[in-house]
Amino acid sequence: MKQYKFILSGGGTGGHIYPAIAIANELKSRFPNAEILFVGANNKMEMQKVPQAGYKIKGLWIAGLQRRLTFDNVLFPIKLLSSLLKSRTIIKDFRPDVVIGTGGFASGPLLQIAGIAGIPTVIQEQNSYPGITNKLLSKKASKICVAYENLERFFPKGKMILTGNPVRQDLIDIDSKRTEAIQYFNLDSKKKTLLVLGGSLGARRVNQLIEKELENILSQNVQVIWQCGKLYLEDYKKYNAANVQVVAFIERMDLVYAAADVIISRAGASSVSELCIVGKPVIFIPSPNVAEDHQTKNAQAIVDKKGALMLKESELDSQFGLVFEALLKDQGKQNQLSENIKQLAMPEATKQIVDEIIKLIK
């Protein structure tokens, strides 16, 4: 049996890394003797997370352009050239059958060089509004696996396959884990549980909101699991109490989703895909500080199908208290949001993406 070789590139945030790892795991399960290599950006979180998942990774000296004039922007052309040259060396030495990009700075140079070398490339576009890198790469890509409909204005229609985003398989049946989850987090089964998610690094504005509203939230017979992110733990751990658990990171996402009754979350693509499978009532607070404002567009795609609520950061001070209290009191609304968001789930995404990759090597 031929020993296939795959390179995956995705990083910068958990939203790019975990889908790449999920695809790698599925490839490994189908081709146990396959060689898999990751390529990431030096000093980004993929350089730790990928080895923890059991895969080798090589780093490129690359970073994105800042919106203002900085020293990093002056260095960008040098970093890009360095990354293109190193990508060429990696591809020449490893000789992959397919190169897969899930987003992040490193995937740009790598997929560009792979395309020039005539190696099949697959883009896994997670957002409802693609970034500039994937738009440029799509011209040479063999296939583009997307998570949202109506992306024809960005990508060649003939290359697109609607697959959804890869998600952790342990989220598929969380309802059966409810009792275990309540014990694991030492929760009161008679209270509603609010889960606050700000992403792996944390979300400053979401943390500020919860700090301001905490007393009001707790007064409504609610307990809180507050994932504030590693950048903010020192600022907010003082709020740990009987009904408040402040953590930097949550290892058992399956159990925390099982325990939650209402969720407040950013609207990164991976989070949105997970929340569709989890099927709990969600209030999205999109980050306005991302390229093309894609988090707002991700959330809006769910809101349009009546699967979630959304509050922009500019609306939080005036609207949050009213929206949260109304949702908490209305069990019918909670049930409706749960049912509608579940209809948008694509639990087979990882398998479908790997099916498309395999078609390129058969």
Image (cartoon, rainbow, N blue to C red):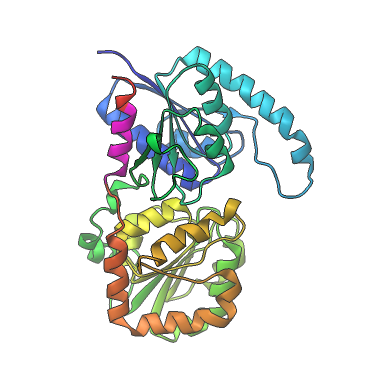
- Relative vertical location of residue 85 with respect to residue 171 in this rendering, above or below: above
Q: Residue 353 at what x, y percent from top left?
A: 33, 36
Considering the image in quadrants, where does the N terminus appear?
top left
Q: Residue at x 51, y 31 (%)?
A: 139
Spot occupied by residue 101 in the image (x, y as percentages of width and height): 47, 34
The magenta-colored residue range is 348-357
Left/right placement of residue 57 relative to residue 31 reads right
* Vertical relation: 242 (above or below) 48: below
Q: Position of residue 24 (x, y in %)?
A: 37, 32
- Give 13 or 303, whichever is nearer the viewer: 303
> Quick one: 268 or 123, which is closer to the camera?
123
Q: Is residue 207 visible?
A: no
Please report the residue visible at 27 percent of the width from the left and 30 percent of the height from the top.
29
Is 82 displayed left or right of 251 in the figure? right
Does 310 appear above or below 23?
below
Image coords of residue 209 (percent x, y): 56, 73
Q: Is residue 65 visible?
A: yes
Image quarter (top left, top right, bottom left or bottom right) of the C terminus: top left
Judge whether residue 325 is colored magenta: no
